[in-house]
Amino acid sequence: MDKKISRSIAKGIVKAPPSKSMAHRYIICAGLCDKVSTISNVDYSEDIKATIDCIKALGARVDVGESFVSIDGRETVIQKILKKAIKTPTSDKSDMSDKQDISEIDFLCRESGSTMRFFMGIAMTLPVTANFYGSETLRNRPFGIYESILNSADNCFFKRLDDKISIKGGLKENDFEIAGNISSQFVTGLLLALSLKKEGGSITLIPPVESRSYIDMTIQAMREFGIDVNWDGENKLRVEADQTYTSKDIEVEGDYSNAAFLDAFNYIGGEVKVEGLNAESLQGDKVYKECFEKLKAEKATIDIADCPDLGPVLFAVAAANHGGVFTSTARLKIKESDRGSVMCEELAKFGIKTHMEENSIEIGSGLKAPGEAICGHNDHRIVMSLTLLLSLTGGTITEAEAVRKSYPGFFDDIQKLGIVVN
């Protein structure tokens, strides 16, 4: 789907969309409870729909409202294991009251990396085969941490097949040591796994530890649902033994990650007030405003190690101002697209010179109207970032439907602010 953006200025008040990151975590924690929880202020992006699909795959009953989701976790595979009622391939079906064979579970993850990595962590603890389906791009993203853990364990496996990734769980290990500069999604997955193990356990992160804020968000969500998990020093996490999730009704806070695309209009000539953000939030992308302020100056240098998802929008704001130098950019290669490369490719169409190295990207300035359509590369953050620049120059962006992944109301919201979209 193409969107034509005319030169226009954003002015007005807009509410930040709900935090996708916290919604993922709350929905999963609710599904691990033995009662009913209700999560309010939910935005049904494609990623959140994937997480809902996967919690259903575990056996949770889900009631979806306009902006809330109620989750009943009493009949999940997790609860049946806890009650010693799970059917394995060699057991008698009479062992289970509902006669359902749950020796194999299919998780449909769409394009959500968070969903797949979180549920892989959970599946590692289950004595079943779990099949993870998703887009080819998603399935080709790194999963080496899980692959190494499972393939070195007894009676477990991790297999990449033509159309899916299959894992066999029942993992006995309770203590892990992994690199701290990997995606925090693996850390979250392992924390979820340990929370389901009677013995609890620990995760030692080998410094440097990146994206610590996302780990803290996971800790916050788990604590909200009754799980005692803590930092044991700077680089070790500990999940206490003999714990169960406690149901809760809770509201998802506003999303700093997506609010950045709205507030960014203020740094390219707009006048926008973004409401609905929690000033005490643990979200790492809360630093976006501080980064935008730095880009008002020439030769600004910004390290995005702890906020890689802000990369594209920061590049766009830099291109519209004085340029900038960004470090710790290597991880942008393994997102929905190779975000560093595609942003450089598309900025060139605006006349912006860039220089990309292994772990840094330099963005120039001097924005011009593009002479051809801008490509969204089927990446929600690329689409939203480049739309900002098109509001200054006018032009067309392709694959604009990618915003459904995280912020389906993006174009509606910016139209309400005065951006002309056709």
Image (cartoon, grey):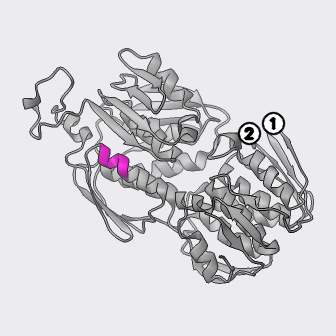
Mark 2: few/some/many CA within 10 Å (<14, 14-19, 20+): some
Percent coordinates x, y for residue 370 in the rendering: 84, 64
Q: Do the residues labelled 1 and 2 touch (CB within 8 Å)?
A: yes
Callout 1 secondary element: loop
Callout 2 secondary element: helix
Residue extent of the magenta highlight: 53-57
Whether 314 is among the magenta residues is no
Q: Residue at the location (78% across, 57% down)?
A: 315
Left/right placement of residue 36 relative to residue 106 reads left
Q: Which amino acid does label 2 sit on?
A: Ala
Percent coordinates x, y for residue 321 in the rendering: 87, 67
Percent coordinates x, y for residue 338 in the rendering: 70, 44
* Residue in the foreground of this view, choosing between 411 and 238: 411
Left/right placement of residue 378 relative to residue 89 reads right
Q: Name the residue under label 1.
A: 358
Left/right placement of residue 70 relative to residue 151 reads left
- State the separation of the CA atoms marked 1 and 2: 6 Å
Q: Which mark is residue 330?
A: 2
Res 194 seen here: no
Tell me if residue 296 comes above or below residue 375 in the rendering: below
Whether 56 is among the magenta residues is yes
Q: Quadrant of residue 401?
A: bottom right
Q: Residue at the location (52% across, 37% down)?
A: 186
